[in-house]
Amino acid sequence: MLGAMELVKIYECLCDRTRLRLLHLLTQGPLCVCHFQEVLREPQVKISKHLGYLRSRRLVEATRRQNWMMYALPAHPSRELAANLACLQDCAREDAVFRADLARLRKLAPTIAGAAPCGRPAGVRAR
Amino acid sequence: MLGAMELVKIYECLCDRTRLRLLHLLTQGPLCVCHFQEVLREPQVKISKHLGYLRSRRLVEATRRQNWMMYALPAHPSRELAANLACLQDCAREDAVFRADLARLRKLAPTIAGAAPCGRPAGVRAR
DNA sequence: TAACAGTATGCCCATTGACGTATATTCCCC
DNA sequence: GGGGAATATACGTCAATGGGCATACTGTTA
């Protein structure tokens, strides 16, 4: 009689504006915390905590890359998660906030595939 | 800079197991509180409160029909709501709890269209 | 090893939500 | 008007959550 809990867990993750924005950005590919900070323009602690929340519930995966934590959607999402992420992406297409986020992200990291942390070219270290 | 709030509101409604079951049942058609009580096997106050929650956020509409309150999904749902309800319905298809709910509902009210409250034939009053 | 950048965590506070018990409300029928 | 059925609300309690501030952690560089 449990069941349906996977879905509830997903919706619990989706029911916060900040987390929604994070997940939406992640549909574009893996990103690091500083990316999120710059795109969302929210304090580091807020971003980090929400990512931790998502991670603890397995909606995102994290790997360290030198100093940076790279966050990504699960490599093998459940059917439910995949469906809801697709739905989110669809809804986001017509929303001003999500579109603006996407625009800032694109300006920041024009090429997402293999994007270096914080938009710096791979191998170049911070100032 | 508001935006995205419609979605958050929807997800806030979806992130509870009981509300999820209620909404899922409502995708079959309008129902009254006693239907929910019998299908979910949950106390009246719990059902009623969650319906109130959903109603206050405009995810369901309610109309009185004699002694019974009939609840239904919005006649004109937003794009976001429609998308998420479809997604929910899709996810529910493979979940034991939702399937069991549906089975109990069908036994209770074989014909949903114009279903009388509490499965009694229209016009027949309670014992 | 010291300094620093990137990130996470502990603590505190305010808000929200879920649940149960008891009680109120609304409508129908006698 | 009284009684009863169906439904909603008021209260109290407890747990979870969001946010900020300060601080800790981790890896890199000097």
Image (cartoon, coloured by chain):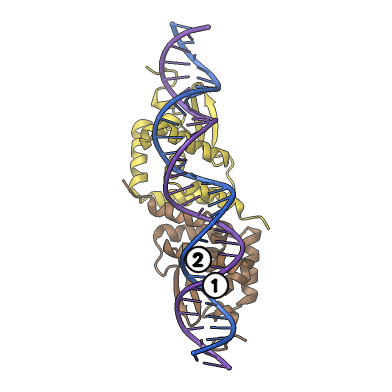
Chain colours: A brown, B yellow, C blue, D purple
Q: CA distance from mark 2 to mark 1?
A: 9 Å
Q: Position of residue A53 (x, y in %)?
A: 47, 62
- Locate residue A45 relative to residue C8 in the image: left or right: right
Q: Position of residue B53 (x, y in %)?
A: 52, 39
Establish if B11 lies above or below A66.
above
Whether residue A109 is visible, yes or no, is yes
**On what subunit does the disc labeled 1 rest?**
A
Whether residue B116 is visible, yes or no, is no
Q: Which residue is mark 2?
A: A51
Establish if B120 lies above or below A109.
above
Instruction: Find numbered disc 1 in the image and state the secondary structure of the residue it sits on.
Output: helix
Q: Residues within 10 Å of mark 1 (few under 14, many from 20)?
A: some
Report the number of discs. Answer: 2
Q: Amino acid at mark 2?
A: Leu
Give the label on residue A33, or none: 1
Residue at the spot 35% in from the left edge and 51% down from the top edge = B94
Is residue A84 or residue D27 the one in the foreground? D27
Q: Amino acid at mark 1?
A: Val
Q: Position of residue A13 (x, y in %)?
A: 48, 57
The answer to whether mark 2 and mark 1 are in CB contact below 8 A is: yes
N-terminal label among 2 and 1: 1
